[in-house]
Amino acid sequence: MKEHYKFKKVLAGAVLLLGSPLVGAEQHSFSLTNGFDYSSGDYGGATDTHILYIPLIGKYETERTTFKLTVPYISIESSGGVVGGADGAPVVIDPDAAGERTTESGLGDIVASATYTVLDGQANGLLLDVTGKVKFATADEDKGLGTGETDYAAQVDIYKTYGAFTPFGTLGYKVFGDTSATDFNNVFYGSLGGAYKFGPQTSGGLIYDLREASTDSSSSLSELTAYVSYKFTETTKAQLYGVKGFSDGSPDWGMGAMVTMGF
């Protein structure tokens, strides 16, 4: 699993069970993923924030190394206090902010990552990935589409295959760039989940996510994602997912869909 958070995390679970977009490629493969993520929640405030996130994800994969670039469009309807973050994850700055309610749209924060597969699962079904990630401050801070600062993250993903079932987990650490108005907390995050292969073309799973609060005035993230994936051809697959939040640091609910094509 070489992805994290919502869009990428669900895609990873599907890829893990259904195979890479280029089945049969000896050393290298390239794929593009597009779709949408929509979430809504009050994040502990008086009004709801609605976020639409539409990324274009390019991934180049060699035998043990994966490079990925995410270029997103983002639209946020909010009265302030919640801004866009990496991979569509909202950053709660001040849940009690009560400014004028507006809808802002534009380029989101571009995210680049590199992953190295330490264990590839060939011997005993155990996979271990190590990932470094940079979120560039390309979103317009004045519109509330991002924090306006660069963030860094490192994470470890581990999976173990037992026939058609694969449990997996993630542990990561994120360093937020502070702004002139906000001192962010550097946070640990993690997830636990399982994926099940129902047949040659279909898989599904559940993923539970936790993340520490990004500011002293916000809450930690706690949410559950359920997804299903269908493989149309050796190079094309689609995924659907839904999200339920359990804390003020999470959306109340969310949903998304994506299509991946290999070349």
Image (spheres, helix red, strand yellow):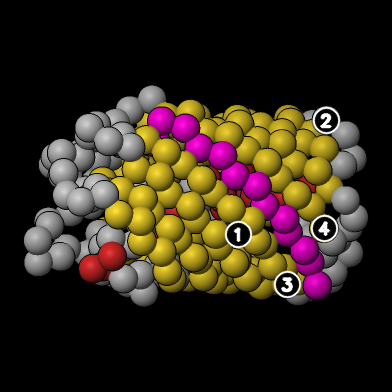
Return the disc, 1 or 2, that comes first in the chain's sequence.
1
Q: Residue 121 appears at what percent x and percent y?
A: 71, 48
The residue indicated by pointer 3 is 30
CA distance separating discs 4 and 3: 12 Å
CA distance separating discs 2 and 4: 18 Å
Three-letter code for the amino acid on which mark 3 is drawn: Phe
Q: Residue furthest left?
A: 181
Q: Label 3: few (<14), some or many (≥20) within 10 Å?
A: some
Three-letter code for the amino acid on which mark 1 is drawn: Thr
Which is nearer the eye, 121 or 95? 95
Q: Seen in the image, is 125 located left or right of residue 256?
A: right
The residue indicated by pointer 1 is 117
Given contact means CB atoms under 8 Å apart, are the residues at marks 2 and 3 in contact? no
The residue indicated by pointer 2 is 198
Return the disc, 1 or 3, that comes first in the chain's sequence.
3
Given contact means CB atoms under 8 Å apart, are the residues at marks 1 and 2 in contact? no
